[in-house]
């Protein structure tokens, strides 16, 4: 939660500055929200607490207006248009060891009571903040033992969705402290550091396997340390097998031998790609293409048919993983001639769009009856730098020809999408097979509407 709050706080301040600079003074907003923030035990005022008023929080177009408490604990968030606002008190975002609170006395953002703002000030929106728990530790490089700065460390409750998470960033000595945590059992995640693999405490690979860390409000939990493994990379170029021209916007994905999907990269204008964030291990590399190129696996040469296995170690780059893509209905000299092209394609993708639930709908025109199978890979890149690949396989029962709409239920679109609010850009690569001898591929950008969920 705190990572959202910190980013959204900066964005809100920027929006507020822009609004102040460019707003038409003839229709300037006159409403405001004000109050006092104190310590729940000592009842002393607390200065420097960020306070934000959020409008449109359950819609795509959300706006935030923020201020800070003064030496007497007072604050005023001004220039508000009439409407319903959620008032949030965010001490953890500035390193204060108080638990997050939303008005009135709510510790979950989604439960915040609305404050109705009209043309004048609304006073008495106060908060008494309780002391939180702290988690401290050190992060080092697993290969060199050196401290790693710039790692975002987040604590997320393993017990309830309704316990706000907290985050911190490691300093030059690799140390961090997460403030303002409620009493709960947490999964501690070490992430968002380029060149290193994301992991949980005691090197757990994911949230489900994360070792719980018990935190008590008012106490400090020490030595929650991590040794991060440097990530590997796979790189190469993609060209046209006939002309030698570089091919841009081709998705290249490293697929672990024992897993259904892995990390992805995309070729640039020169046909070059780099797949970063790869864990040590063995991979095949799959290329998701567009017409007139069929999907391809890296085989090591144009005439080889079996996929080549690439093994990488921590911190290593496997370069030169180049592929030449043969356009449909052409064959290299070492292969049998391909059948002549069909005058009318058996299947066409007419449209792709995102539903508000986070799923994807694909509109097809099918010209041959029978079973239709498809594999869809979605590479989601969140505004916070995370990339998540999601694979969906679906087999449709036999039906006649005509236009069909297929819903791809991305039941686990990855934390990159789940943690976002608003819209997230992604690239969808689908392969449709109406029969064994034919396949149709398409890569298309998709603008996801992140599903409305309680912030975690």
Image: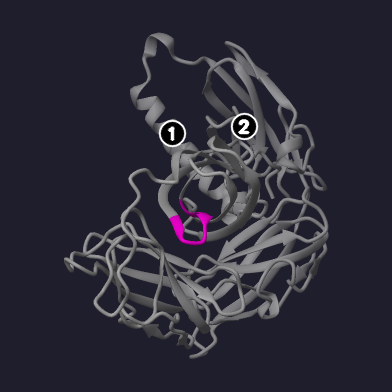
The image quadrant of residue 83 is top right
The magenta segment is: 428-439
Residue at numbered disc 1: 15
**In the depicted view, which residue is nearer to us: 451 or 349?**
349
Residue at numbered disc 2: 57
Q: Residue at x 49, y 77 (%)?
A: 148
Relative image position of residue 108 (x, y in whole percent) = 75, 42
In the drawing, does residue 366 fall left or right of residue 418?
Answer: left
Relative image position of residue 399 (x, y in whole percent) = 62, 41
SS label for mark 1? helix
Label 1, label 2: how far apart the Cα atoms are: 15 Å
Q: Of discs 1 and 2, which sits in the foreground?
A: 2
**In the depicted view, which residue is nearer to us: 317 or 262?**
262
Relative image position of residue 306 (x, y in whole percent) = 44, 82
Q: In this view, does 2 lie above or below 356?
A: below
- Magenta stretch secondary structure, dominant: strand
The image quadrant of residue 393 is bottom right
């Amino acid at each position: 939660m705190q990572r959202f709050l910190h980013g959204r706080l900066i964005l809100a301040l920027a929006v507020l500055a822009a609004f102040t600079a460019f707003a038409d003074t003839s229709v300037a907003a006159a409403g405001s929200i004000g109050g006092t923030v104190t310590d729940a035990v000592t009842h002393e005022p607390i200065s420097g607490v960020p306070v934000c008023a959020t409008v449109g929080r359950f819609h795509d177009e959300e706006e935030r207006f923020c201020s800070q408490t003064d030496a007497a604990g007072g604050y005023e968030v001004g220039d508000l248009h009439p409407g319903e606002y959620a008032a949030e008190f965010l001490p953890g975002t500035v390193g204060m060891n108080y638990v997050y609170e939303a008005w009135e006395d709510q510790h979950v953002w989604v439960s915040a009571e609305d404050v109705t703002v009209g043309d004048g000030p609304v006073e008495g929106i106060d908060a008494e903040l309780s002391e939180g728990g702290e988690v401290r530790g050190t992060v080092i490089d697993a290969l060199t033992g050196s401290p790693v700065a710039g790692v975002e460390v987040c604590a997320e409750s393993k017990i309830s969705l309704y316990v706000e998470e907290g985050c911190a960033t490691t300093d030059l000595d690799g140390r961090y402290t997460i403030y303002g945590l409620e009493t709960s059992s947490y999964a501690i995640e070490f992430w968002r550091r380029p060149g290193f693999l994301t992991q949980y405490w005691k090197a757990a690979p994911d949230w489900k396997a994360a070792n719980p860390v018990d935190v008590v409000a008012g106490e400090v939990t020490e030595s929650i340390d991590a040794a991060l493994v440097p990530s590997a990379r796979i790189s190469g170029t993609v060209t046209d097998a006939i002309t030698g021209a570089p091919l841009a916007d081709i998705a290249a994905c490293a697929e672990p031998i024992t897993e259904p999907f892995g990390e992805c990269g995309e070729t640039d204008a020169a046909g070059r790609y780099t797949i970063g964030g790869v864990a040590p291990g063995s991979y095949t590399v799959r290329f998701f293409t567009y017409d007139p190129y069929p999907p391809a696996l890296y085989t090591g040469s144009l005439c080889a048919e079996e996929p080549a296995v690439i093994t990488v170690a921590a911190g290593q780059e496997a370069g030169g993983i180049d592929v030449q893509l043969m356009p449909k209905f052409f064959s290299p000299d070492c292969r049998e001639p391909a059948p002549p092209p069909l005058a009318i394609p058996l299947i066409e993708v007419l449209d792709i769009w995102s539903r508000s639930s986070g799923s994807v709908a694909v509109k097809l025109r099918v010209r041959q009856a029978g079973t239709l199978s498809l594999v869809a890979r979605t590479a989601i890149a969140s505004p916070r730098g995370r990339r998540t690949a999601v694979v969906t396989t679906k087999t449709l029962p036999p039906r006649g020809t005509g236009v069909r709409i297929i819903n791809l239920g991305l039941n686990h679109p990855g934390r990159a999408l789940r943690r976002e609010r608003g819209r997230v850009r992604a690239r969808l690569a689908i392969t449709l097979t109406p029969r064994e001898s034919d396949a149709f591929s398409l890569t298309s950008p998709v603008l996801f509407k992140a599903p409305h969920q309680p912030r975690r």
